Image (tube, grey):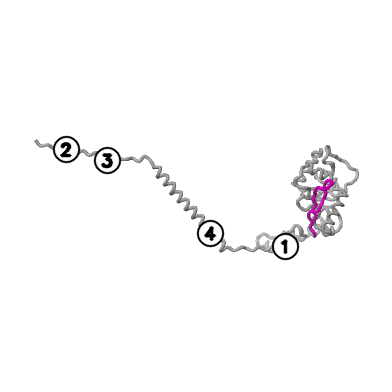
């Protein structure tokens, strides 16, 4: 009886499944990424350095030339540098197709009108000052030259060239004491010319006067809109019970103080006041109270 041998049974090969990335692979990947990023950063910095070096070696600096005396200086009486070159009529005609004979006639009329009324136009800002109180006006911010009317004679009037700069950074009470020491009166001038005076500002209550029989002829000062000193004057007037709504706020200087400032101005550099363009006064403590002194003077 023959027998058939059965084939040998083979055992299957086990398959090892990968369940995830090992910790070694993660660390190696981070190191490789860091090296790549570092290489890119070094390359970018090298490119920037080479570009800057090339610009420094191949660039050309543009020389700047200053021309003092060409105008534009606020301290100079020459304002030629502030003039703009207007195009001629021929240049305008070349740039437009519109007929311009009417415009030419209108411009000629305007030029003639300005020429005939040059004085009135120059003094237009002075006519806007509160003239009901009389005297001279000095407009300023405490940080730039004052403007206004007042004073007579040849040269720049006192109201045009004087500027008073009180001590910066002082309290409202200290500011009031300085005004009282110099006998400076605050006033609110209404649209109809009604003037309300306030003095003895450091006292409580201060002295308020709403009617004065004699006409006002003292030099007065008014701060520019937005000046911190203007707001301080407004607050002092409000504390005294004086309304400041729609009113011009001014400071009246006594004739004695005006003469004292004039003497300080002349003795500062020995100049004739007619040759002075602007004088700036400061305030400082003295043996008794405070005193004025000249901080800057610009000649004509």
Residue annotated with mark 3:
13
Residue annotated with mark 2:
6
Furthest residue in direction right, as rendered: 213
- Alpha carbon separation for disc pair 3 and 4: 63 Å
Q: Does the CB distance between marks 2 and 1 fall below 8 Å?
A: no
Decide whether the magenta segment is chiefly helix, strand or loop.
strand
Quarter containing the N terminus: top left
- Alpha carbon separation for disc pair 2 and 4: 83 Å
**Residue nearest the viewer, comparing 134 with 101:** 134
Residue annotated with mark 4:
51
Q: Percent from the top left, x then y, of residue 37?
A: 47, 50
Quarter of image, res 18: top left
**Residue nearest the viewer, comparing 295 with 142:** 295
Determine the secondary structure under disc 1.
loop
Local crowd at mark 2 within 10 Å, few (<14), some, or many (≥20)? few
Magenta span includes 144: no
Residue at 65% across, 61% down? 95
User: Image height check: is 165 above or below 63?
Assistant: above
Q: Nearer the viewer, mark 4 or mark 1?
A: 4
Residue 213 badge:
none
Q: Does the CB distance between marks 1 and 3 fall below 8 Å?
A: no
């Amino acid at each position: 009886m023959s027998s058939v041998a059965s084939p040998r049974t083979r055992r299957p090969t086990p398959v090892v499944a990968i369940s995830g990335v090992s910790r070694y692979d993660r660390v190696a990947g981070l190191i490789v990424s860091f090296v790549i990023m570092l290489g890119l950063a070094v390359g970018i910095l090298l490119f920037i350095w080479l570009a800057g070096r090339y610009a420094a070696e191949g660039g050309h600096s543009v020389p700047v030339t200053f021309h003092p005396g060409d105008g534009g200086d606020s301290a100079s009486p020459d304002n030629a540098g502030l003039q703009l070159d207007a195009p001629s009529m021929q240049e305008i005609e070349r740039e437009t197709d519109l007929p311009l004979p009417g415009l030419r006639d209108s411009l000629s009329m305007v030029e003639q009108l300005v020429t005939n009324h040059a004085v009135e136009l120059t003094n237009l800002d002075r006519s806007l000052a509160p003239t009901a109180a009389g005297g001279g006006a000095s407009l300023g911010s405490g940080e730039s030259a004052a403007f206004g009317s007042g004073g007579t004679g040849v040269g720049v009037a006192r109201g045009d060239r004087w500027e008073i700069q009180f001590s910066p950074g002082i309290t409202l009470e200290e500011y009031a004491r300085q005004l009282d020491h110099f006998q400076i009166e605050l006033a609110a001038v209404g649209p109809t010319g009604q003037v309300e005076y306030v003095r003895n500002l450091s006292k409580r209550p201060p002295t308020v006067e709403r009617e004065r029989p004699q006409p006002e002829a003292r030099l007065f000062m008014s701060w520019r809109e937005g000046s911190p000193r203007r707001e301080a004057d407004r607050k002092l007037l409000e504390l005294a019970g004086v309304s400041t709504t729609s009113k011009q706020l001014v400071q009246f200087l006594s004739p004695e103080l005006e003469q004292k400032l004039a003497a300080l101005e002349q003795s500062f550099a020995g100049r004739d006041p007619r040759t002075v363009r602007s004088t700036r006064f400061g305030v400082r403590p003295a043996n008794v109270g405070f005193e004025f002194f000249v901080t800057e003077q610009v000649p004509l």
